């Protein structure tokens, strides 16, 4: 704030006083408002000149904008649109051009929409008296000026001075100061119209962010009522083509773009010549996009208004609006109040993804019968829950006979999911069962209280310690849809207003898989943000969302700054969001152990994962891995399952591991059964029922046998010559055969043996092709699918060869990557 002595309310009062004087001049005299007139008005209002530091030239420009809004509220425009725009532009032209920028203006992107464009934005929105209008980045209300006739008007502005000014200019409206990039997770009422001129290149913290406008657009669209209209002034980079096309597509998902118009010179009066776009989007599932057009001036927008499609007829969009603060906070998909889901509507026909309702299921008091057993596996079926809206899994699932003999406990937790997910049976009954039990388990607490040790990964019981939430382990194999089940667990919390979560997996590249699963449930790709794009020394900005990172990223850091510290600063100590440990076996080495060559210290990524759990006792932890523990020691990271500690037969982790290890595989099986009986573990796998195996045998020809023998002899010659070379090089003693340089000998023989193995691996593959290729042709002719697994693409070898080439060789590339290359 420019003043060091005035708070926001008082500063806004002085600005408004000066603006009232300038507004009076605009309305009563046709003469231009000069700089001296503006300075006199500011000096009179503040009782101080600019040189005294109470106000700045930038403040005076902001005051002129406020004066213009005041004047417009008392101005009656001509009915003819062309004449109306001309009058607006003439009125604004009488104000001085803004030639000074402040650091705050640039950091907070305070560039108000000029009067003519603001009026046309209101016309494009086609606002009616029954509309509920939201302007999420309201500034001083230039856009909101043209929505005064709506039923309700909500204005949001982060800057305290501008917010105070809005409270004076729009006394009957709701004025808030949230980060507009996450407005959809905060406000409680669904607007039917949104008018938007978001920041173009900096976020709420003032940091450079090329995607901030897209985030604002997506946040606004998420809270807009179905059938509502969003009109936005966006940066030119917000386009269906170009480097930001993917962000654009994600931001407009679920909307139909009615107008996409490029404008030049729209902000000349505000001191910038930036090229902008005006977009009109109607929220709906039909999709579609009008081709972009380019206009030379704002007045040319008038020609686009008559051809704009009429707005869709709105249903009662305020039905089921949340009323309690908890429900209103973060309700992207509305439809619940006072912490309980709203009753479902009578018909699912035409329901949009923005509706949400609880998952319906019936509790089977007596555990259902097990499925048919084949070998050691049993056909899987939910034993305690029946889902009327649940579909069969796309492929049959099985679980081991030992696990099937144990029934999951009865659960009363009713997850909330988007209605479209339930109606379209996006999740199978087996997946819904996991969601119910995972959320039920993470809603409970482990017995006892614990404190974090200064060193080590274990917790110590303590009467004044923290109470830790129970966790859940998803042990499903490939094909059961672990990612979609994890996304569904997050979606329930997301709909309940809990909007900050962590998703940790094996690789940063898997963020796209997480986004795919999240979008399948009605979320947007922008909700999931990769941490790897942020430096460890940076502060995590952007508010709520799902932060995605790999285990390698979790254990990393720069200097004294670690990723763990970075995350703990973003997550408050009472954080109760989800921590999803996907591919959790990556933490398996956390406790160390004994290896072939002695003791092994704990893995750093495992330690980081356990410390994250220890530091956030109220976090809802879900582990997911098809290979949870090949050794009982590898379950040391799963402290939230309640396997040891108070209320169990094992006082601590070490005693648990030592006792279970004595029991071998049988004891491990008992642990899995016990976990399922507690309701914290499920493990299903795809059934191979109906799968037939047939070995395709290739008979070596005489010529192939002769070739193989020739190559074997060649490698024998190479081996003998290599041993001779090692003797000549002094690596081994040529007379006695003793090793003189063990390291060099080991390296040489290792490279020789690995090259030989790669050579014969490729040779054997090539020998099989005369039988394999005709077999593939026969399968294709019979309309069967053929899957070929590539064990190696030789990409590393290609890179090494290319690195050794000179400029002339690169010009005419000719490489031999066949087995002969190894020879």
Image (cartoon, grey):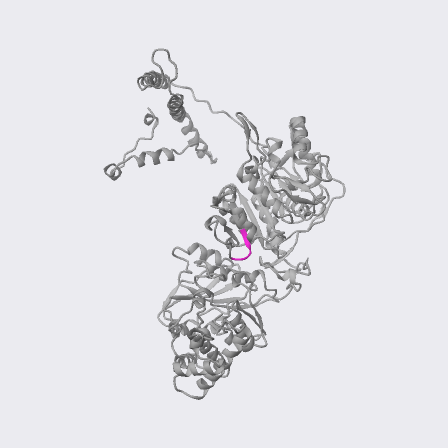
Q: Judge whether residue 680 can be spotted in this image.
A: no
Span highlighted in magenta in the image: 542-546
What secondary structure predominates along the stretch shown in magenta?
A: loop
From the viewer's perspective, is 697 left or right of 620?
A: left
From the viewer's perspective, is 752 left or right of 502?
A: left
Q: Judge whether residue 229 can be spotted in this image.
A: yes
From the viewer's perspective, is 297 left or right of 324?
A: left
Closer to the camera in the image, 10 or 370: 10
The image quarter containing residue 128 is bottom right
| Quadrant where the image shows the C terminus | top left
The picture places residue 24, in percent across and down from the top left corner, at: 47, 86
Q: Residue furthest front?
A: 52
The picture places residue 331, in percent across and down from the top left corner, at: 60, 59
The picture places residue 81, in percent across and down from the top left corner, at: 43, 79
The picture places residue 280, in percent across and down from the top left corner, at: 47, 66
Q: Is residue 146 above or below residue 677?
A: below
Give yes or no for residue 543 being in the magenta stretch: yes
Closer to the camera in the image, 186 or 122: 186
């Amino acid at each position: 704030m420019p003043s060091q002595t005035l708070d926001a309310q008082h500063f806004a009062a002085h600005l408004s006083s000066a603006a009232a004087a300038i507004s009076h001049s605009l309305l009563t005299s046709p003469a231009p408002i000069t700089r001296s007139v503006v300075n006199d008005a500011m000096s009179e209002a503040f009782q101080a000149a600019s040189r005294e530091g109470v106000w700045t030239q930038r403040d005076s420009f902001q005051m002129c904008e406020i004066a213009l809004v005041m004047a417009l509220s008392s101005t009656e425009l001509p009915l003819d649109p062309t004449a109306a725009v001309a009058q607006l532009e003439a009125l604004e032209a009488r104000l001085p051009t803004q030639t000074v920028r402040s650091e705050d203006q640039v950091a907070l992107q305070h560039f108000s929409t000029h009067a003519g464009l603001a009026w046309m934005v209101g016309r494009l929105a086609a606002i009616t008296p029954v509309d509920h209008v939201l302007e999420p980045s309201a500034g001083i209300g230039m856009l909101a000026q043209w929505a005064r006739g709506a039923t309700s008007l909500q204005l949001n502005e982060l800057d305290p001075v501008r917010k105070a000014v809005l409270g004076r200019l729009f006394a009957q409206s709701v004025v808030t100061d949230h980060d507009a990039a996450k407005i959809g997770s905060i406000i409680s009422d669904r607007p039917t119209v949104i008018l938007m001129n978001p920041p173009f290149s900096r976020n709420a913290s003032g940091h450079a962010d090329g995607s901030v406008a897209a985030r604002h657009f997506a946040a606004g669209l998420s809270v807009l009522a179905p059938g509502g209209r969003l009109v936005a002034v966006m940066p030119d980079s917000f386009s269906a083509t170009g480097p930001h096309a993917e962000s654009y597509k994600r931001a407009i998902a679920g909307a139909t773009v009615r107008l996409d118009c490029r404008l030049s010179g729209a902000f000349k009066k505000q001191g910038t010549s930036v090229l902008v776009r005006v977009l009109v989007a109607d929220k709906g599932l039909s999709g579609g996009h009008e081709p972009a057009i380019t206009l030379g001036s704002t007045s040319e927008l008038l020609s686009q208004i008559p051809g704009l499609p009429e707005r869709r007829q709105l249903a009662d969009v305020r039905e089921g609006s949340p009323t309690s603060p908890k429900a209103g906070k973060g309700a992207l998909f509305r439809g619940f109040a006072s912490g309980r889901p709203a009753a479902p509507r009578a018909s699912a026909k035409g329901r949009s993804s923005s509706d949400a309702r609880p998952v319906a299921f019936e509790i089977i008091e007596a555990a259902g019968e097990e499925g048919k057993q084949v070998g050691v596996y049993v056909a899987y079926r939910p034993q305690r829950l029946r889902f009327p809206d649940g579909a069969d899994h796309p492929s049959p699932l099985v679980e081991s006979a030992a696990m099937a003999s144990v029934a999951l406990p009865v659960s009363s937790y009713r997850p909330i999911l988007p209605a479209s997910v339930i109606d379209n049976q996006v999740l199978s009954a087996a997946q819904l069962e996991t969601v119910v039990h995972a959320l039920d388990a993470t809603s409970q607490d482990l017995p006892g209280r614990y404190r974090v040790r200064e060193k080590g990964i274990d917790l110590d019981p303590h009467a004044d310690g923290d109470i830790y939430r129970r966790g859940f382990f998803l042990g499903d194999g490939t094909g059961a849809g672990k990612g979609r089940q994890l996304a569904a667990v997050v979606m329930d919390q997301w709909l309940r207003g809990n909007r900050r979560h962590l998703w940790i997996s094996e690789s940063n590249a898997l963020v796209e898989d997480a986004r795919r699963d999240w979008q399948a449930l009605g979320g947007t790709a922008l909700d999931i943000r990769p941490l790897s794009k942020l430096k460890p020394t940076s502060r995590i900005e952007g508010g709520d969302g799902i932060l995605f990172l790999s285990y390698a990223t979790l254990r990393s850091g720069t200097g004294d700054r670690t990723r763990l510290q970075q995350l703990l600063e973003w997550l408050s100590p009472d954080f109760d969001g989800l921590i999803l440990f996907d591919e959790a076996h990556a933490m398996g080495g956390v406790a160390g152990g004994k290896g072939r060559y002695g003791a092994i210290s704990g893995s750093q990524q495992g330690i980081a994962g356990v410390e994250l759990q220890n530091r956030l006792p109220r976090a809802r932890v879900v582990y997911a891995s098809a290979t949870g523990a090949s050794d009982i020691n590898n379950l040391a990271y799963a402290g939230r399952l309640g396997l040891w500690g108070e209320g169990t037969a094992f006082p601590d982790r070490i005693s648990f591991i030592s006792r279970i290890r004595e029991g071998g595989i049988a004891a491990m099986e008992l642990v899995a059964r016990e976990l399922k009986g507690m309701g914290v573990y499920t493990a299903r796998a795809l059934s191979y029922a109906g799968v037939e195996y047939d070995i395709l045998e290739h008979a070596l020809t005489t010529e192939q046998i002769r070739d193989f023998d020739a190559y074997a002899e060649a490698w024998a010659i190479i081996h003998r010559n290599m041993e001779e070379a090692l003797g000549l090089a002094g690596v081994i003693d040529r007379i006695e055969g003793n090793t003189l340089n063990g390291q060099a000998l080991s390296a040489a023989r290792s490279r020789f043996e690995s090259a030989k193995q790669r050579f014969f691996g490729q040779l054997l593959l090539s020998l099989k092709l005369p039988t394999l290729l005709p077999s593939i042709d026969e399968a294709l002719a019979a309309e069967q699918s053929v899957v070929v697994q590539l064990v190696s693409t030789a990409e590393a070898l290609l890179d090494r060869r290319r690195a050794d080439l000179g400029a002339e060789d690169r010009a005419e590339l000719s490489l031999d990557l066949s087995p002969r290359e190894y020879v």
